Image (spheres, helix red, strand yellow):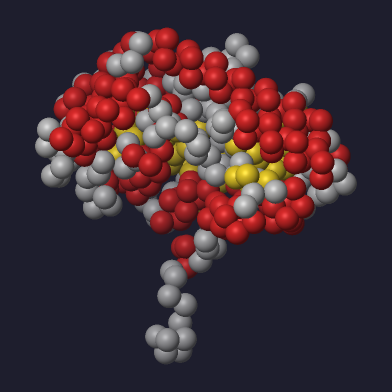
Amino acid sequence: MTSSERPFLNRRLAEFGTTIFAEMSALAVSTGSINLGQGFPDTDGPQEIREAAVRALRDGRGNQYPPGPGVPELRAAVSAHQERRYALSYDPDTEVLVTAGATEAIAAALLALLEPGDEVIAFEPYYDSYAACIAMAGGTRVPVTLRPHEGSFRLDLDELRDAVTDRTRLLLVNTPHNPTGTVLTREELAEIAKLAVERDLLVVTDEVYEHLVFDGAEHVPLASFPGMRERTVTIGSSGKTFSFTGWKVGWVTAPPALVGAVRSAKQFLTYVASGPFQYAVAEALALPDSYFEAFRADMLAKRDVLAAGLAEAGFEVFRPQGTYFITTDIRPLGESDGFAFCRALPERAGVVAIPNAVFYDHREAGAPFVRFAFCKQTQVLEEAAKRLKAAW
């Protein structure tokens, strides 16, 4: 076989093509549909934080390469945020690393911590970059499936325990959980922590929706449980909390040895990124509690608008306890194939959604589920609900 005949994409990534988000966003543009697929807000975050970014640009802060670990102001702000919200103490100089969004943090952590053949347990359905990053690191993903139960998706702790083998290196945990909106309870997290300690597992925990929890649910960082701080890489992000997803400012908090390992991989990915925006996010993290409460209340109201509209249109709605996504079951509409449903939906209803099956290894388990994003203006959600109701 000549080089021109041989596939250019390596075997590890052969299963990953263009993401469903690119496909569905292109459909939204070509059909003029309301895009409730990709999870980005359609309004910007606080004006004072935008002005902080402009001020940093004008003052010449961050216009050149920022420090590799991130600007000191942001690392200090991340440390203060973890202390204030969760009583978790991290040294800003040795235990905080700024990344190009949470996606790079996930990639760098998995590339740094996995050896080829190591098994990684992740909760299925999972954010699509998890599978790709595990593959790039040469690891083997082992899905543990969250299943519908009494109106939400829940973790089977016995299934999780049974999934751990002598080859398991790492647990990849996401709470609040994208795409299902599940928030793991304190009791569930305690059992996960106990298992990680017993089996001496590393943990990477994606907590980017930490400030979006509803209906009395609470976000409890896994690192706060006994024996977990020293084995946990916690990932956070400004994009979801402050509605500046394009700035791509995320971070890692972990003990020095783990931060050092992640930094070793990260420096050969972006090296550094988002210089002026780092200063602005430092100011954002210091906003008063009233900002975070108002942000959550706004998203809760939007969740309820879209959830009601979807139910009126005939979907079975799984009301999320966290994130800004709603998972629905399309079988009450006489449909069962989420891919076909979502590809036809723009023409049929003028709305774009995402088939949850893309987040599963076991595609059949996710086939009838479809995800909608509610991080949009209320009038946009109302119009989307109106269109969906008219289509059935």
Q: Residue 18 appears at what percent x and percent y? A: 52, 61
| Residue 326 in view here | no
User: Closest to the observer: 84 or 49?
Assistant: 49
Where does the image place residue 231, in percent across and percent down from the top left?
A: 36, 29
Q: Is residue 287 left or right of residue 295?
A: left
In the image, farthest residue toward the bottom: 2
Q: Is residue 307 placed above or below 103 in the rendered structure?
A: above
List x then y, in percent, for residue 5.
47, 86
Number of numbered markers: 0
- In the picture shown, does residue 19 fall above or below 273? below
Is 136 positioned to the left or the right of 75 in the image? right
Residue found at x 21% / y 39%: 275
Q: Residue at x 48, y 46 (%)?
A: 130
- Front position in the image: 58 or 366: 58
Q: Residue, x 12% and y 37% (percent of image)? A: 60
Q: In this rendering, would 271 be left or right of 293?
A: left
- What residue appears at the point 77 percent right and 24 percent down from the top-left corner? 150
In the image: residue 115, left or right of residue 319: left
Residue 217 position in % (x across, y down): 58, 15
Split into 4 quadrants, where in the image is the N terminus? bottom left
**Residue 163 appears in which quarter of the rendering?**
top right
Quarter of the picture holding the C terminus: top right
Would you identify the image quadrant in which residue 70 lies? top left
State whether residue 138 is above or below residue 47. Answer: below
